[in-house]
Structure formats: C-alpha cells, structure tokens
Amino acid sequence: MKRSGSSKYANAPVCKKYGIKAAWYPHDKDQDPNEVASAASMEQLLAMSPDFAINLDIGHFVAGNGDAVGFLKKHHARISHLHIKDRRRDHGPRVLLGTGDTPITECVKLVRDNKWPIMVIVEREFADPSRTSLEQTRWELNYLRGILA
C-alpha cells in the first residue's frame, strides 16, 4: 500500500462511487512500512476516507505490540469486525485462547457492554493436538460464551 495524503492510492474513489465500505485487515508486521499493522498505519487509512474501516485482528495487533483495548475504544465507530485469536507479544506464536497476551475478555466485553455494532469472529489458527477441529471450535465458542456469561 502506498502511503500518501491522496486517497487515490487506497481505492477511496471506488468505495465512494459504489457505496462500499472497505475494511482493512492488519497483521503484526508493524515495522514494515508497506503493511497495515500499527495503529498509525490504520489511522492513516481511516483518515483517507470515511468509507474505510478496520477489521481488527486483536491477536495480530497484540503480536505487533499494539494496544488492542485502546485502539478499540478510540476507533470503535470505524471497526467492522474483531478477529479473535490469542498470540504472544513481540511477534510471538499463536496459542490457545486465554493463554496468550491478547486481551480477549476486555475487547469482547467492550463490544457487548457498549452495544457497538461490531461482529466478533473466532479465527481458529491455533491447532490443539488434543482435539479434533470440531472439538476445538466448540471449545473456543464455549470459551467466548463463558466470557460473556
């Protein structure tokens, strides 16, 4: 992505013309100037067009040492989805939900308690060798239900 003050580099005219909301998805490569990863890079995108939103992967954001709770509080009106996974800071590995550094509980409760219209999506990237894929998916959904109970 070319970062410039001109929104022509980020498809803003297409979004405006067709009434499309583009939701940008961050990764944890916060030192790469061509990646959407840091809070600053996401804020640059949001400034380019009111039609731009963020599909915030809180696991990637935390792995890139971002403050997921702070970003969510500040930009909730421009966040379309939360991708839920757990990771360790400093570009650490994906881990079982609830065992990493990602503030899953805080983020999910913020969405619920404030009734923000943000979709919460479990992105099952950690493979638990003790469970089948279906068992792990059920476990992760139950984990989130437990947070919200």
Image: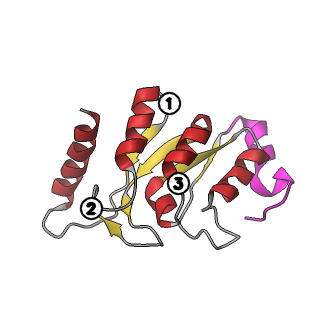
Please report the residue visible at 42 percent of the width from the left and 43 percent of the height from the top: 107
Identify the residue under disc 3: 67
Please report the residue visible at 81 percent of the width from the left and 45 percent of the height from the top: 13
Quarter of the view holding residue 97: bottom left
Number of callouts: 3
* Residue 99 on image: x %, y %: 28, 61
Height in image: 124 above or below 33? above
Horizontal side of 112 relative to 78 (left or right) equals left
Horizontal side of 54 relative to 57 (left or right) equals right
Q: Which mark is residue 40?
A: none
Sequence order check, earlier mark of 1 and 3:
3
* Residue 51 on image: x %, y %: 71, 39
Identify the residue under disc 2: 96
Dot 1 amino acid type: Pro
Please report the residue visible at 84 percent of the width from the left and 53 percent of the height from the top: 8
* Residue 96 on image: x %, y %: 26, 62
Sequence order check, earlier mark of 1 and 2:
2
* Residue 67 on image: x %, y %: 53, 54
Say few, some or many: other residues with alpha carbon within 10 Å of mark 3 (under 14 / 14 to 19 / 20 or more): some
Q: Does the magenta stretch include residue 17?
A: yes
Mark 3 lies on a secondary structure that is loop
Say few, some or many: other residues with alpha carbon within 10 Å of mark 1 (under 14 / 14 to 19 / 20 or more): few
Identify the residue under disc 1: 117
Q: Which of marks 2 and 3 is in front?
A: 3
**Span colored in magenta:** 1-20
Q: Is residue 31 magenta?
A: no
Quadrant of the rendering where the N terminus is positioned: bottom right
Depth check: give the residue in front, 53 or 88. Answer: 88
